[in-house]
Image (cartoon, grey):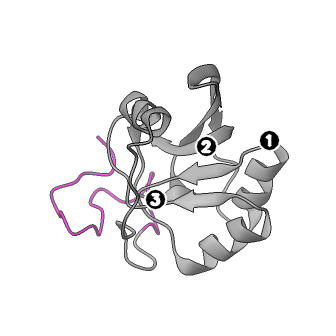
Amino acid sequence: MRIAISTDGDSVSAHFGRCPSYTIVDIEDGKVGKKEAVDNPGHMPGAIPQFLHEKGVECIIAGGMGARAVGFFDEFGIKPIVGVQGRIDEIIEKLIKGELKGGESLCKPSAGKGYGIDKTLCDHPDETNKCNQ
C-alpha cells in the first residue's frame, strides 16, 4: 500500500492542501519500504488528489480536509483519513499496527488560507498550535 501524509516538518500537517510537503510511504508485509518527501505542487481544487493518484497513492492521512476535497480523493480511489495528529514516524507505526484512528477534521472550512507563508496561527480548536514552528 502506498500512503501519503500531509507533512509540516516531522509532523502531520493540519492542512492537507496547504502543507509544505507530503511524505509518501510504501508499506508492504507490515514493513516500511520506500519513503520519500515530495513538495506540495500547489493548492487548486482537485490538483493534489490527481497529483497523488499519479504517484500511486491509495490513502491520504491529514489533520484536516474539507468535504469537497474528500470528494476529489474519492473520485481517484484514494481513501482519506483525517483528524490525525502526531509525528510522521509514529503515525506510520500506528498504521502498520492497525492502531491509527481518524476523526473529525481539525480545521474548519477555509482555515488553511494563508497557511505556510502568511499565517502564524491556525484556526484549530487548540488555538496555541502554531502553524510555522
Q: CA distance from mark 2 to mark 3?
A: 13 Å
Q: Quadrant of residue 9?
A: top left
Q: Secondary structure at mark 3?
A: loop
Q: Where, quadrant-wise, is the N terminus in this rendering?
A: top right
Provide the residue span drawn in magenta: 112-133
Residue ID at (43%, 34%): 97
Question: Which residue was labeled with disc 1?
Answer: 55
Q: Is residue 69 magenta?
A: no
Q: Looking at the picture, how far across and down is residue 72, in whole percent?
A: 71, 71
Between circles 1 and 3, the one closer to the viewer is 1
Q: Secondary structure at mark 2?
A: strand
Q: Is residue 121 magenta?
A: yes
Question: Which residue was labeled with disc 2?
Answer: 4
Q: Looking at the picture, how far across and down is residue 38, in whole percent?
A: 65, 35
- Is 3 above or below relative to 102? above
Residue ID at (34%, 66%): 106
Q: Is residue 74 left or right of residue 11?
A: right
Circle 2 Cα neighbour tier, 10 Å, few/some/many (<14 / 14–19 / ≥20): many
Label pair 1/3, CB-CB below 8 angstroms: no
Circle 3 Cα neighbour tier, 10 Å, few/some/many (<14 / 14–19 / ≥20): many
Q: Looking at the picture, how far across and down is residue 7, in whole percent?
A: 48, 41
Residue ID at (59%, 52%): 60
Q: Looking at the picture, how far across and down is residue 48, in whole percent?
A: 70, 57
Label pair 1/2, CB-CB below 8 angstroms: yes
Who comes first in sequence, dot 2 or dot 3? 2
Residue that protrudes farthest toward the right in the picture: 54
Identify which amino acid the numbered label 2 is placed on: Ala
Identify which amino acid the numbered label 3 is placed on: His
Circle 1 Cα neighbour tier, 10 Å, few/some/many (<14 / 14–19 / ≥20): few
- Residue 45: in sight, yes or no? no
Residue ID at (79%, 43%): 56
